Image: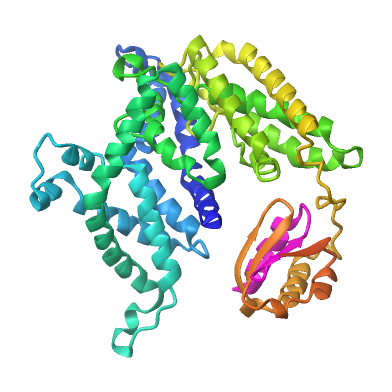
């Protein structure tokens, strides 16, 4: 289950990666055409260009479009070979579910009253969460039925051609289930959202804490949908980038994004520095290699997963403290009136472009807030690591340096071929994945795995966590080896 959730989390990054385009277009557009936010006549070539760019951004920020991006992106991301057919299946599922559960259709089927919570729920059916469900249905149908062989008289519909058809039937069943389940889910999400919104500053801090806490399970995206998109009528992200202000909504616009900026831009680098300073003397280079680039990535882009996954499973107590710090700094940030938004994540890039939007406020506070976040994260992490001897990067018990592996040669195809031969050939491989330094393989028969053969490729080692799992320590060049390995397995 954990592996499935992690795969879902990775697949969600595909549609989310589209949103920075909207952020860049919005930031430039509002800067060139202040009349979009301030009102007044739009005259002149430059304001017209700005207006054109803001309208282009709105094409991606619209809630329905975001849901479509999730449906297609998740389907492609979770398919075994990332085939476009899976994306088509995800789109088919989304169209089928949202049409069958449209308010008019539902009212005819179930006869809900016009003002009922049930009908209100189906009025919000075209949301990102339903898009994710459609994407999961599409990818699952693709993975299960892409190689289906039908009788000769139906041969045309064999293989990938039957995926969309099966997806449609599965989506009908899903829609029938959601007819009864969605109002309950919607009511629960609405209650959660209203409770947190009602807590104002404390609610924003609680949301930030839960957001970080759920990342290891991949469930933070479900929570984000409640606050960032128009799943239950909030939409902090979509309204912010659409050029609205707090006067247009019932909460302080941007409060569910602003608190992440000081934490991601400055808190993560502070925590990373603490890890480097507390690493073993012979492993400081290893620690720097793992967390330094992750910290830079967090500052510029707001992408924190490389940093978080480097220690969350080795030191879960430290990760809990990390999540608490997010909650505390979010409350402070929101209370001080700092407002900024992100289209992708809370990095310097999004801060720069969101500063021109109407809802942005006191963005200069990022300097004192950032300095405070850097200092607090550094002090707390250093104290926790040394006080409780936590196993963060560079403090592991093993002496093996996975980042400085010297492969047998620079021919990644040859290295991959040797590893493939060592694991029993492509017929024995059921799943291929990789992390920062390791090639992670799922196999059928562990007796066919030859450790000596695999090590002849120059890899650092072979680990077998279970009878169906093999991890090959390749080093930082693992991505190139993994790509060639996948090609050989096709």
Q: Quadrant of residue 357?
A: top left
Q: Where 154 sits versus 478, above or below?
A: below
Q: Is residue 482 visible?
A: yes
Residue lying at the far bottom of the rendered structure: 152
Q: Is residue 341 visible?
A: no
The residue lying toward the viewer, choosing from 212 and 262, is 212
Residue at 83% x, 32% y is 278
Q: Where 279 sits versus 259, above or below?
A: below
Residue lying at the far front of the rendered structure: 388
Q: Where 63 sits versus 182, above or below?
A: above
Q: Quadrant of residue 228?
A: top left
Image quadrant occupied by the C terminus: bottom right
The residue lying toward the viewer, choosing from 229 and 154, is 229
The residue lying toward the viewer, choosing from 233 and 29, is 233
Residue 349 point in image, percent of width and height: 58, 28
Residue 469 lies in the magenta-colored region: yes
Residue 71 point in image, percent of width and height: 38, 51
Residue 485 point in image, percent of width and height: 68, 68
Q: Is residue 355 left or right of residue 418?
A: left
Residue 288 point in image, percent of width and height: 80, 37
Residue at 71% x, 50% y is 436
Residue at 66% x, 36% y is 317
Q: Quadrant of residue 246?
A: top left
Q: Is residue 7 left or right of residue 140?
A: right
Q: Which residues are magenta?
A: 465-490
Residue 383 lies in the magenta-colored region: no
The residue lying toward the viewer, choosing from 53 and 175, is 175
Residue at 38% x, 30% y is 238
Q: Is residue 14 left or right of residue 408?
A: left
**Figure label count:** 0
């Amino acid at each position: 289950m954990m592996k499935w959730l992690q795969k879902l989390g990775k697949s969600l990054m595909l549609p989310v990666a589209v949103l920075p385009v909207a952020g860049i277009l919005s930031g430039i557009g509002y800067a060139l055409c202040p009349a979009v936010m301030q009102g007044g006549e739009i005259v002149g070539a430059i304001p017209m260009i700005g207006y054109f760019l803001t309208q282009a951004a709105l094409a991606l920020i619209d809630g329905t479009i975001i849901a479509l991006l999730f449906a297609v992106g998740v389907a492609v991301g979770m398919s075994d070979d990332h085939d476009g057919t899976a994306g088509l299946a995800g789109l088919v599922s989304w169209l089928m579910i949202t049409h069958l559960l449209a308010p008019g259709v539902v009212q005819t089927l179930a006869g809900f009253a016009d003002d009922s919570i049930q009908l209100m729920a189906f009025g919000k059916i075209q949301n990102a969460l339903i898009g994710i469900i459609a994407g999961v249905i599409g990818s699952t149908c693709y993975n299960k039925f892409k190689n289906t062989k039908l009788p000769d008289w139906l041969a045309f519909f064999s293989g990938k051609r039957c995926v969309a058809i099966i997806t449609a039937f599965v989506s009908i069943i899903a829609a029938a289930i959601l007819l009864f389940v969605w109002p309950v889910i919607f009511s629960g999400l609405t209650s959660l959202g209203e409770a947190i919104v009602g807590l104002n500053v404390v609610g924003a801090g609680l949301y930030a804490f839960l957001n970080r806490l759920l990342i290891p399970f991949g469930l933070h995206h479900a929570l984000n949908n409640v606050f960032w998109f128009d799943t239950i009528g909030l939409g902090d992200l979509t309204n912010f980038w659409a050029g609205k202000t707090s006067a247009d909504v019932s909460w302080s616009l941007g409060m569910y994004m602003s608190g992440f900026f000081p934490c991601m831009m400055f808190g993560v680098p502070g925590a990373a520095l603490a890890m480097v300073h507390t690493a073993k003397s012979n492993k400081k280079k290893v620690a720097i290699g793992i967390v330094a680039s992750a910290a830079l990535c967090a500052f510029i882009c707001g992408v924190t997963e490389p940093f978080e996954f480097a220690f969350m499973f080795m030191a879960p107590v430290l990760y809990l403290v990390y999540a608490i710090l997010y909650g505390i700094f979010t409350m402070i940030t929101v209370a001080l009136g700092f407002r900024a938004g992100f289209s992708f994540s809370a990095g310097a890039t999004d801060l720069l472009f969101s500063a021109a939007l109407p809802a942005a406020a006191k963005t200069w506070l990022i300097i004192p807030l950032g300095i405070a976040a850097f200092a607090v994260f550094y002090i707390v992490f250093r104290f926790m690591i040394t006080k409780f001897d936590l196993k963060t990067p560079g403090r592991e018990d093993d002496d093996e340096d996975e980042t400085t592996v010297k492969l047998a040669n620079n021919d990644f195809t040859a290295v991959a071929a040797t590893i493939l031969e060592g694991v029993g050939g492509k017929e024995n491989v059921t799943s291929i994945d990789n992390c920062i330094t390791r090639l992670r393989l799922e196999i059928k028969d562990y007796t066919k795995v030859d450790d000596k053969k695999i090590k002849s490729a120059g890899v650092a080692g072979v680990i077998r966590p279970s009878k169906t799992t093999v991890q090959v320590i390749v080093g930082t060049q693992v991505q190139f080896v993994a790509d060639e390995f996948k090609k050989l397995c096709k």
